[in-house]
Image: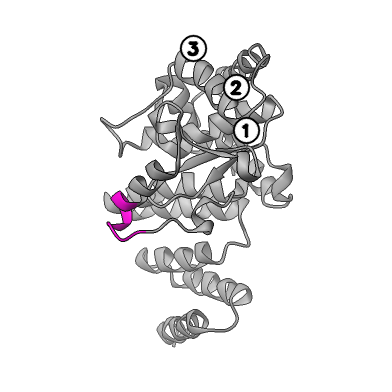
Amino acid sequence: MSGAQAALDALGQIPDGEIDIATAALQLARVDLPAEDPTPIAAHLSDIARAVAAGLTEADTPDRQAAALAMVLTGEFGYRGDAKTYDSLDNANLIRVVQRRRGLPVALGILWIHAARTAGWEAYGVNFPGHFLIGLGTGRRRVMVDVFAGGAVLATPALRTLLSNFEGPDARLRPEILAPMNDRDVLLRLQNNIKLRRLRSGDVTGARCCNTDMLRFAPAAAPLWRDEALLADRLDEPSAALAAWERFLTLVPTGAEALAARDAIRQLRMRFN
C-alpha cells in the first residue's frame, strides 16, 4: 500500500466535516502518479489561499465572492475548463490539473471550494446533472457558479437551460438538484470520472483499482461495493466478488437490490461446487 492509499484509508475513518477536500484530492492524484512530487502542488494550494486572502476587502456577498475567486483562479492563475480534450484522464487528476491549469468541472470546483473556504466563505459542491457546479453562500443569497466557464454566476434561466441541455426540453429545476453535496461525494464524483473513462477504454483493471481506492475513503458507499463485485467478477476473481456482494448486503439488506445481490451470491457459490 502506498502512502497516498494509507491517507485515503484514514479519510475513510473520519467524519465528512473533517475532510480537507483539496488535500484529499491531492492524495487521490498521487495514487495514479506516484512518481510526481506533491510538494509543488501543496505549495500552489497555499498560493491560491494567499491570493484570495489579499482581495477580501469588498467580497461581502456571494456574488462578490464569486468575482473575487474568478479574479484569482481564472485571472491570476489561468484556470480554464478543458473543452478541447475533455475526456483526458489528466482533467480529473489534481496534479495534472494544477500543472496544466485545465480540468473537468469537478476538479476545478475542488480548487474553487478550497480557495473560498480558506477565505472563510461558505462553499460547496452542487451535483447538477451532467455539469458539476459550486454554490457560494446560503439561503436566498446563495449563487450557483460554473467554474468550467471561468466562474460565471448562473441565474435561474441559465440553470434551466443547462438542465434542458442534459435532460431535454421538459426538464424542470428541482430542489435536490441544487442541494449542497458533502465533500466525500464531491471526491467520489471526481473519481467516478476516472472510473467511467477507464471502463469506456476497456481498462477494467484500472477501473477496479479506481473503485477500490474510492472504497478506501468511502467504505459505507453501497454502490461502490456493488461495482467492486461486478468488476471483480469481470476480472474472474469470484472470491473477491463474493466478499464484495456480502459487504453490499450488510449495507443494503432489503429491497430489490438486495434480492439481486443474493442471486449473484448464489451464482458465485455454484462456481465453487
Mark 3 residue element: helix
Residue bearing the label numbered 2: 45
Residue bearing the label numbered 3: 76
Magenta range is 164-171
Q: What's the CA distance linking mark 3 and mark 2?
A: 14 Å
Q: Is residue 11 located in the magenta-colored stretch of the structure? A: no
- Which residue is rendered at x = 56% and y = 28% of the image? 63
**Mark toward the start of the polypeptide (3 vs 2):** 2
| 159 shown above or below 101 | below
Q: Is residue 37 visible?
A: no
| 224 shown above or below 15 | below
Q: What crowding class fits label 2: few (fewer than 14 Cα within 10 Å), some (14-19), or many (20 or more)?
A: some
Quadrant in the rendering for residue 5? top right
Q: Amino acid at mark 3?
A: Glu
Task: Mark 3 vs mark 2: give the one in front.
Answer: 3
**Mark toward the start of the polypeptide (1 vs 2):** 1
Residues under numbered marks 3 and 1 in contact, where contact means CB atoms less than 8 Å apart: no
- Residue 142 in the image, given as x and y percentages of width and height: 59, 39
- Which residue is rendered at x = 52% and y = 81% of the image? 258
Residues under numbered marks 1 and 2 in contact, where contact means CB atoms less than 8 Å apart: yes
Mark 1 residue element: helix
Q: What's the CA distance linking mark 3 and mark 1?
A: 22 Å
